[in-house]
Image (tube, rainbow, N blue to C red):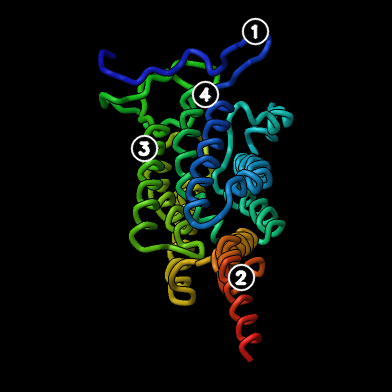
Amino acid sequence: MDLAYIPSPSTGVINLGPIPLRGYAFCIIIGVFVAVWYGNKRWIARGGTAGTVADIAVWAVPFGLVGGRLYHVITDYQLYFSEGENWVDAFKIWEGGLGIWGAIALGAVGAWIGCRRRGIPLPAYADAIAPGIAFAQAIGRWGNWFNQELYGKPTDLPWALKITESANREAGYYHPTFLYESLWCVGVAVLVIWADRRFKLGHGRAFALYVAAYCAGRVWTEYLRVDEAHHILGLRLNVWTAIIVFVLAVLYIAISARIRPGREEIVEPKAAEKDGAEKSGDAAETDGPTDGELKDAAPDTDAPDTDTSDGDLEDKAGNGAGSATKS
C-alpha cells in the first residue's frame, strides 16, 4: 500500500544495559512530572505554597495507578481470566492497560487523603492540577503508540498509523486514535486554562470542565477504536461511561456556580496564616520609632539648659561683691 503514514516503533522497550526502559512506562512517568510541575505553578499563583502539590501527589499518583489498572482489568477481565489466559498478566502494568476513569476516581481518593492531612480543600487542589492532568494524558497516550495498541478503524488517510503483524493483531493502516486523543487532551488543557483566567473558576469547576471536555472527545475517539470491548445497547462500555461522566460534570458546574459562586480566596489556610503573621511583624517594625528617632527625642541631660561660660560666671561674682561693698 503506497501512501504516507505514521510508522510504529519496532519495539516498545529500550535496553539500557541490564535495565529495560519501556516506552509505555516512560510516557506515564513524564506525564506525572509535567502534571505536578504545572500544577505547582498554578497552586502558587492561587496563593498556595511550593511543594504542596507534590506532597499530595505522593498519595494521588499511587492510588490513581491502582485505580486505573483495576478499571482496566475489571472491564476487560476476559484478557486475564478466560480460558487459556494467565491471570498473572493482570499485574503487568508496564505492558499497557490503564483506565482513565478508574485512575481519576481512585486518584481523587488519594488526593483527598493528602488534602485532609494538610488542611486543604480538595476542590481547590483539583482546580489547580486539572490542566496538568490533561497534559499528562496527552503525553501518556504516546505509550499506546509504543505498544501498537488501541488504534482505530482501517483508513487510507495520509496520517494513517502503520501497525505490524503480531500474535494478537493484523498488519495494516489504521486511524491513530492515540494521536487524536493526545491532541484533544492538549486542547482540553488550553480550554481549561483560558476559561479559568476568563471566568475565575473555583470550587472544583475548573476540574469539572476538564472532565466534561475530555469526555466529549473520548466519545468519538472511542467510537473509532477496533480493540475488543464490552458493548451495551450497541455502544462500547467506555462510550457509556464518557456520556454519564460528562452529564455529571456539567451538572456539577451548574449547581456549584449557583451555590458557591466565585473562587476561593484562601486555598491553603496555613500558608495564609503564616503570610499574615509575617505581614503583621513587618508592620510592627515599621510603625514603631526607630533607634535614631528615640535618640533625637530623648532630653540631653549631660548639658546645662544655658550655655554659661567661665567669664560670665566671674563677672557675675564680681558684680555681686561690688554691690555688697557699696551697701
- How far, Cα to Cα, is label 3 from label 4? 19 Å
Verify CB contact (< 8 Å) between mark 3 and mark 4.
no
Q: Is mark 3 on a helix, strand or loop?
A: helix
Query: Which mark sits nearer the N-terminus, 2 or 3?
Result: 3
Residue indicated by mark 4: 147
For marks 1 and 4, give the CA distance: 21 Å
Q: Say which mark, if any, is on residue 314.
A: 2
Q: Where is residue 146 in the image (x, y as percent from the top left)?
A: 49, 22
Q: Check disc 3 and report the residue beneath it.
A: 183
* Dot placed on the residue nearer the N-terminal end, 2 or 1: 1
Above-or-below relation of 112 to 301? above
Q: Residue furthest bottom?
A: 327
Residue for point 61% across, 70% down = 314
Left/right placement of residue 317 relative to residue 245 reads right
In the depicted structure, whether residue 291 falls above or below residue 45: below
Task: Say whether disc 3 or disc 4 marks the residue closer to the N-terminus.
Answer: 4
Numbered disc 4: secondary structure: helix
Q: Does any portion of residue 230 appear in the rendered image? A: yes
- Asked if the residues shown at circle 2 and circle 1 are in contact, with their CB atoms under 8 angstroms apart, the answer is no
Q: Is mark 1 on a helix, strand or loop?
A: loop
In the rendered image, the vertical position of residue 263 relative to residue 153, given as above or below: below
- Kindly identify the amino acid type of the residue bearing the numbered disc 4: Asn
- Spatial CA distance of label 3 from label 1 is 34 Å
Find residue 17 and name its label: 1
Give the vertical position of 52 relative to 153 (above or below). Answer: below
Depth-wise, is mark 1 or mark 4 nearer the camera? 1
Amino acid type shown at disc 3: Leu
